[in-house]
Image (cartoon, helix red, strand yellow):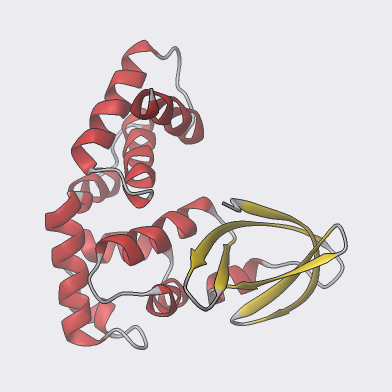
């Protein structure tokens, strides 16, 4: 599993970037949001990645933030009929926070305006993300201005769901970790702690 690339940006296009990592050029599919965040050619860059293995190819997808990658994984793993190409279109069509608000608020019109999505796919995205994994409840809590600790816990749960864990199991692991944690751990610390509990 390649979880991130850190190197020099060789070239970039709205849908693809090439990162030079120690003399090896990695071609990475990216959304527009990531393209907008890239530095100029020859500058240092770090992309969070997802490796998609198919029979005929290994495709690498890159993202400027973990939130983008988590949403990409959530879409391709949890929504019927949504593959990597459409998931990139969703990320290119609106920011992660706006997408979460649309799902939580059942805003099918806004989702349907994303190129390649349409009304039926928008309905499927909302229904399957809300009903199958309980994602919308966590997003609604975040949108309502939940305390920082709760917001970070919600983000950790969603990251675990995007990795393939069931929402109830993810929530239970995060809650168990937070009971023992001191202070206000960051989202990545909560995620690591919950992962240790889930895999032990």
Left or right position of 40 against 55: right
Residue 105 in view in this figure: no
Query: Is residue 110 shown above or below 200?
Result: below
Quadrant location of the C terminus in the rendered image: top left
Q: Is residue 157 above or below residue 109?
A: above
Give the x, y percent position of residue 170: 28, 36
- Tell me where residue 78 appears, x and y as whole percent: 26, 61
Please provide percent x and percent y for residue 37. 64, 66
Q: Is residue 100 above or below residue 25?
A: above
Picture quadrant of residue 199: top left
Res. 59 image quadrant: bottom right
- Mark count: 0
The residue depicted at 43 percent of the width and 66 percent of the height is 95
Residue 108 in sight here: yes
User: Extreme front residue here?
Assistant: 55
Q: Name the one closer to the observer, 69 or 196.
A: 196
Q: Is residue 166 above or below residue 91?
A: above
The residue at 41%/31% (across/down) is 195
Q: Nearer the viewer, residue 192 or 26?
A: 26
Horizontally, residue 52 falls left or right of residue 11, namely left
Residue visible at 22% across and 42% down?
167
Q: Is residue 138 left or right of residue 149?
A: left
Q: Nearer the viewer, residue 97 or 172?
A: 172
Give 174 or 199, whichever is nearer the viewer: 199
In the displayed structure, does residue 45 sit left or right of residue 74? right
Q: Give the residue at x 86% y 57%.
A: 22
Q: Position of residue 79 (x, y in %)?
A: 25, 67
């Amino acid at each position: 599993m390649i979880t991130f690339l850190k190197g020099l940006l060789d070239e970039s296009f709205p849908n693809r970037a090439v990162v030079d990592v120690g003399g090896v050029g990695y071609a990475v599919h990216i959304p527009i949001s990531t393209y907008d965040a890239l530095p100029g050619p020859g500058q240092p860059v770090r992309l969070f990645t997802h490796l998609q293995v198919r029979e005929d190819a290994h495709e690498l997808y890159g993202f400027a933030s973990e939130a983008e990658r988590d949403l990409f994984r959530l879409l391709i793993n949890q929504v019927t009929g949504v593959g990597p190409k459409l998931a990139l279109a969703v990320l290119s069509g609106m920011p992660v926070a706006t997408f979460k608000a649309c799902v939580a608020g059942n805003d099918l019109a806004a989702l349907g305006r994303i190129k390649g999505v349409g009304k039926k796919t928008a309905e499927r995205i909302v229904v399957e993300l809300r009903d199958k994994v309980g994602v919308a409840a966590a997003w609604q809590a975040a949108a309502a201005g939940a305390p920082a600790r709760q917001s970070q816990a919600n983000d950790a749960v969603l990251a675990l769901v995007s990795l393939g864990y069931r929402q109830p199991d993810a929530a239970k692991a995060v809650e168990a970790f937070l009971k023992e944690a001191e202070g206000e751990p960051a989202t990545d610390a909560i995620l690591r702690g919950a992962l240790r509990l889930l895999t032990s």
